[in-house]
Amino acid sequence: MWEYSPALETPGSIGIDSRHELFIGGRWCAPRSGCYFDTESPSREEKLSEISLGGAIDVDDAVRAARFAYDKYWRPMRGRERAKILFRVASAIQEKAHELAVVESMNGGKPVRESRDVDLPLTAAHFFYHAGWADKLDYAFHGRTPRSIGVAALLVPWNVPLLAAARKLGPALACGNTVVLKPAKSTALTALRLARILEETDVPPGLVNVVTGGEETGAALAAHPGVDKVSFTGGAEAGKRLAKALAGTKKRLSVELGGKASNIVFGDAPIDQAVDGILGGTSFSRLLVEESVHDQVVSKLRRRMDSLRVGDPLDKNTDVGAIHSRARLDELRALVADGEASGAVRYASPCALPAKGYWFPPTLFTNVGPTSRLAREEIFGPVLSILTFRTPDEAIEMANHTMDGLSAGVWTDKGAKALWMAQRLRAGIVWANAARKFDPSVPFGGYKESGFGREGGRQGLHDYVELCG
Amino acid sequence: MDQVGIDERVRALGKRSIKREGKSVALKLAVSMMDLTTLEGKDTPASVRALCSRAHAPLYSDPSVGPCAAVCVYPNRVPTAKRALSASPVRVASVAMAFPSGQSPLPGKLEEVRQAIDLGADEIDMVIDRGAMLAGDYGRVFDEIAATKEVCGARTLKVILETGELGSYDTVRRASDIALGAGADFIKTSTGKVSPSATPAVTLVMLQAIVDYYEETGRRVGIKAAGGVRTAKDALSYLVLVKETAGDAWLEPAFFRFGASALLGDVLMQLEKERTGAYAASEDV
């Protein structure tokens, strides 16, 4: 039997500092509390580094540094000068793409194939795209004149750490704001590396400040009176708490809270390509399949699932990496147990899992009830729930019958049917015969509990400007 | 068939990194799957004999490499090849059915198949009538393949779709389904006379048809990628495609072949490099 030999990216040559300080006002500062926490590699269950636990005083320092940079450098600067700086950052990210991808995979557990081929190219693309807007903002708002807002607090999640930061940094900076970035507690390493890149590219000090820490750090940042704008991507509960805390203040808020994506597969779909699309990412989510092709689709999914290579995220041939943390793995297990208890039928790929680290085999569930947690809750892991429908109307009803609406995919050979579906789906983005296609020029954001505000495109600029005149 | 999705899948699989032991094993496998091919008007008995000896023992310095699966020649060169390989497991394949165009009357084409078999061919590589395929005359395409299979009997029949002339993945898929249903033992991408010949994308489409047919009927049909596979790196990417689309069961000469002439040289050079750590001069292999 022919097997691939491991083809590992070598972390040794990249080097991760044993301790990371806060990046405030262009300098690396120890947290005032002196407290640090460990960040680990979920695939090896090893400590990677110590990270500063930013407290209220550190947040205050960072916001002041951002305000100073806003007043002194960034607001008075011509758009075309800001553009030059953003272009420089974009190029530097491209140059360092390899090490950023490797660190992203070490810290987050996602396969390097994905961080290298998806996350990093998109991260650089967001900077390039928004650099292009920096000197053309006067033409972006139908004749109205935009003004920058001030200091923006950017809170980003753990699932796409660097890309989520870039989605916010691009428009925030292009529109003339300065920033305090708070990465997720468990995956802060790439944001800190980005800070180092900013330092090396000579961006004005204080333009971007990085404060690491937990949810309290984020809450302190959002609540800081010097912050004019808060952009949050993350869990629904934390998002709601944030919205409540900011209610009645003059701060602008935009939130993206994720969502349970549906892939809708019709009988006339290119089924092999649909299967590729459904199983292509790190989270499989939910499949609505026309009843007439259910068995065929399930059999193809199983075959393909068995061929997925699960293992070391740093192996270039890995398709499915580690689960992001112990807590996420426990959550996933509970959800799966709950699904089995509710009568769903489980199939797991017979792949071997590494002994150390947090792993879950690619799994699919058939016979899933539309109200079960498996069908409704966003799942961060290689687990697919399959439900059936009979007519397009029924598919719409099932897909829209959720609390959220971030994205959906429609698989059919009929263009008219895909458009008909897209008009009726309550989702921020609808893909036709494709999955997880992102581009900085396309606004991204959700309906309902998936949040409000858009990132990317001309629409994404709105959240970072004040319109006057 | 969704063209964008197919191309994307092929690109993703093209990024597999095959190194070290995995690479040596795969390259040896590739040698054992090769149909060494010469289809020139200038082929002579001597040139065919040379090809046969190369197919039988590809690498003097390492007898664990090879033999190849078959040699593929025109019908007139079959007796020479048969004699040269009388003591060898290497099979002799003959092209037939008015290769490469297929545009001749059926009785004459079938007679050609019969004669190739009488001359000793173990395998027949037939071409389909692409004119009929593109005109939508699917019944005729099916009947010609079925009639050829009847003449071949137990001998291996490979059906060349000539995907470079079919114009879309949908037509490639339809032609694959027709050939599978009509009794092909292998479906083969190309004659090597038309550009483009084999591509990973059409191979993927054909593999998916083969897998669907297997799931439906339980009959395992093989696939041959012919023409355009020139380097060891190309060969590895095809093996990845087969492994991850059809599965390990297809990774043997009974179910996967390369039709090539230049490929062997590069594969042997890479194998020697893996073994000795240095590239040999090309005339040594």
Image (spheres, rainbow, N blue to C red):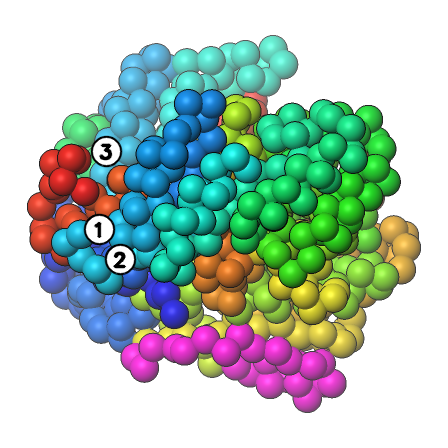
Say above or below: A78 vs A344. above
Residue A63: x %, y % from top left: 30, 43
Evaluate whether label 2 is on the same chain as label 1: yes
In the image, what residue occupies the spot 51% across and 67% down? Answer: B249
- For the N terminus of chain B, the quadrant is top right
Q: Secondary structure at mark 1?
A: loop
The answer to whether residue A159 shows anywhere in this view is no
Q: Is residue A457 left or right of residue A294?
A: left
In the image, what residue occupies the spot 65% across and 30% down? Answer: B98
> Closer to the camera, A168 or B17?
B17
From the image, tell me which residue sits under label 1: B59
Residue A423: x %, y % from top left: 80, 39
From the image, tell me which residue sits under label 2: B65
> Closer to the camera, B17 or A339?
B17
- Residue segment shown in magenta: A333-356
Q: Write down the quadrant of residue A240 in the picture.
A: bottom right
Q: Amino acid at mark 3?
A: Glu
